[in-house]
Amino acid sequence: MVSRRRNASSGPAAASGVAGAGRGSAPGGELEALLARDPAQLRTEARGAFAAASRGRPIVLMGAGGLGRRTLAGLRAAGVEPLAFADNSSELQGSLIEGVRVRSPADAAREYAGRAAFVVTIWGAGSPHRLEHSRAQLTALGCDVIVPFPLLYWAYPAELLPHYLQDEPHKVLEQARDVRRAFDLWEDETSRAEYVAQVRLRMNADFDGLPRPVGHLQYFPSDLFEWSSAEWIVDGGAYDGDSIRDLVRLHGEQFARVLAIEPDPANFQRLEATVAGLPAALRSKIACECVALASETGVLHLDATGTASSATGRMPASDGVAVRAEALDTLLAGKVPTMIKLDIEGAEPDALTGARRTIVAHAPIVAACVYHRQDHLWQIPLMLREWQPDYTFFLRPHNEEGWDLVCYAVPRARLVRRPQ
């Protein structure tokens, strides 16, 4: 993977007073430079980064989708009221969202360009958008103060953080030993470069330095491990059957078994419909379970959104739908998977703990998402290495700006055989 490089001093975090290491150095050297910061100093700088970058101006939120609305709620909890939303959707323009007017970017720029800070609140999975796109659009419209949303979130951490991989930068430094240990696990230069870019994103809000997504379908990399017609796959976080559709498109009937696990009732209905629409020979190989993966048997409560973002937690029953939780070791009941895929909205470490016996005994390929929390990037590969020394590790981005980032743990016997 090749990314467009700029000098770090021109990045958004540097402009706001949060210094960062230059991206031109080798990954290991750059990581050391990033981790050489003082945590207390970085915390202070990050808390003040938005005030410096925004020049103390009032706020226009560029993006009135889910992130924009979440940001509005957090700002109001902190006693801050934005001037307006700006959004490219003609369907939203002219409407009110929680009392805040949505304007076209051109109209918002005409009214506010010289007196407001435009905070880019566009960041979501499944989108080709990158910060550079909004920056270019707003700059062309005459906006002179454009700020990425993490700097605003750092200013109001109690109201806005954590949010997926976004959290306070100094927390990375508090785990510097583990960050370094995980760097040494990655098998190839592509993974090491991606890892450092992801650490830099967490510390500097440097979206521009992220490599582009890889080309292969998520969870099914032809360049990392050899496929077998005997594959026995656990699909943790099966959603509506999207990974099953990819599996069938890529490999047809060349697999032995899929256990598709999805706790959200609405998603589970769509999953069953996807499986029901497959030919009989494929349907007979796929079992579906409406259950949450956890470290042990119990009850969790699900924020049942009916989307890919449905998440479980040990919240009060009044805040979610009660769902049965099981350890994967228990669900498998002695069956031996060859691959475990996990995309379960931050519950990956808990689910992996519930699969520990299987991982230790059988070393299945693990494809686990590592973007739902700041420290999953290093904590998930480290826990897998502790349990299974035979694993080799790869890190691959499957979406823009940190989304769908997957850690692949592959036993050496399953690696793609490369020409000598």
Image (cartoon, rainbow, N blue to C red):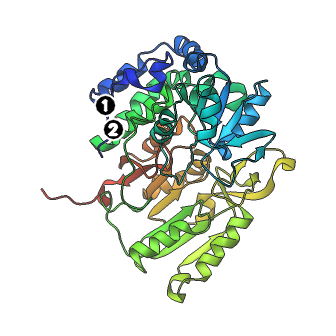
Q: Position of residue 342 (x, y in %)?
A: 54, 55
Give 99 or 6, whichever is nearer the viewer: 99
Question: What is the x, y in percent for residue 92?
Answer: 69, 51
Left or right placement of residue 46 versus residue 417 in this view: right
Residue 37 x/y as whole percent: 45, 15
Residue assigned mark 1: 27
Residues packed near mark 2 inside 10 Å, few (<14), some (14 to 19) or many (20 plus):
many
Q: Residue furthest front?
A: 110
Callout 1 secondary element: helix
Does residue 322 lie above or below 403 as drawn? Answer: below
Q: Are marks 2 and 1 in contact (CB under 8 Å)?
A: yes
Residue at screen point 60% across, 75% down: 287
Q: Quadrant of residue 64?
A: top right
Q: Quadrant of residue 188?
A: top left
Examine the rendering and report whether any part of residue 230 can be seen.
no
Look at 68% across and 55% down and name the residue there: 91
Q: Is residue 268 shown above or below 371? A: below
- Marks 2 and 1, Cα distance to the nearest angstrom? 6 Å
Relative image position of residue 274 (x, y in whole percent): 60, 76
Q: For numbered disc 2, what is the local secondary structure?
A: helix
Whether residue 214 can be seen here: yes
Q: Hey, what amino acid is under mark 1? A: Pro
Identify residue type, mark 2.
Answer: Arg
Seen from the viewer's position, the closer of residues 419 and 399 is: 399
Looking at the image, which is closer to me, 14 or 323? 14
Quadrant where the image shows the C terminus:
bottom left
Is the residue marked by circle 1 packed among few (<14), some (14-19), or many (20+) residues within 10 Å? many
Q: Is residue 232 above or below residue 152?
A: below
Compared to residue 282, the image places residue 225 above or below, namely above
Which residue does the image show at 70% across and 43% down from the upper left? Answer: 102
- Residue behind mark 2: 192
